[in-house]
Image (cartoon, rainbow, N blue to C red):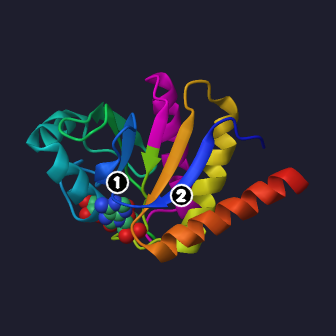
Amino acid sequence: MKTPFAIECIQGDIARQDGFDAVVNAANAELQIGGGVAGAIHRTAGPGLAEECRPLAPIHPGQAVITGAHQLPNRYVIHCLGPVYGVDEPADALLADCYRHAIELAEQYGIESLAFPSLSTGAFGYPMAEAARIALATVMKASDGCHQLKQVRFVLFNERDTELHRKTLANLQHHDTHG
Ligand code: AR6
């Protein structure tokens, strides 16, 4: 698996990714304001985002849809509905679908830089280590077919999750290189 775009993991707020073409929202099925990531994104974007989202809802687990970014410092928001852990099955495949579909949309819209939060690991209860492995492996694999995307960033809320993502990424890249 080669990685034609750069992947980095940083600690921060997904609603403050200045300079990135698009950010991913950990959405609810109705694509309306919620807690966590969806709260931060909708609060910063303003009410126009929920309005643009209304006709696109409801979405199903694993699906991704794209809108404008309104007052966020980006061009687009890609909204993904992650699986509720222990409810939506198969959870691992549905979580991987979110990342794959988000990257497909990014490619279609000529997005060069994309920032992801850790989907499903808050209110939806997905264990962080397992979710990190699925997220990073899926993004690395999807990068093979990408021509537009040049930079992918994972934005984690705290230091522990950031370190976990960095270590997971390093392990996956090591296995890639050394078989
Ligand atoms: N920036 C980056 N990461 C964040 C931020 C932020 N501003 N806020 C929280 N996180 P969640 P889910 C982390 O709950 O599990 C919503 O209410 C957080 O620590 O936002 O997919 C929606 O309306 C966690 O690791 O998303 C849905 O109903 C991760 O982001 C539901 O929750 C995801 O937490 C979606 O649940």
User: Any mark on residue 9, and which?
Assistant: 2
Asked if residue 179 shows in the view, the reply is no
Whether the magenta-drawn stretch holds residue 112 is answered as yes
Q: Name the residue furthest right.
A: 179
Residue at 70% over, 34% down: 144
Q: Is mark 1 within 8 Å of ligand 1?
A: yes
User: Cβ–Cβ below 8 Å for labels 2 and 1?
Assistant: no
Quadrant assignment for the C terminus: bottom right
Whether the magenta-drawn stretch holds residue 108 is answered as yes
- Number of marks present in the image shown: 2
Q: Is mark 2 within 8 Å of ligand 1?
A: no
Which class describes the residues within 10 Å of circle 1: few (<14), some (14-19), or many (20+)?
Answer: many
Q: Which residue is mark 1?
A: 14
Q: State the CA–CA distance, disc 2 to disc 1.
A: 12 Å
Which residue is more in the foreground, 72 or 117?
A: 72
Residue at 24% over, 47% down: 31
> x%, y% of residue 22?
38, 37
Residue at 62% over, 29% down: 146
What is the magenta range? 87-114
**Left-right relation of 109 to 131:** left
> x%, y% of residue 45?
18, 44
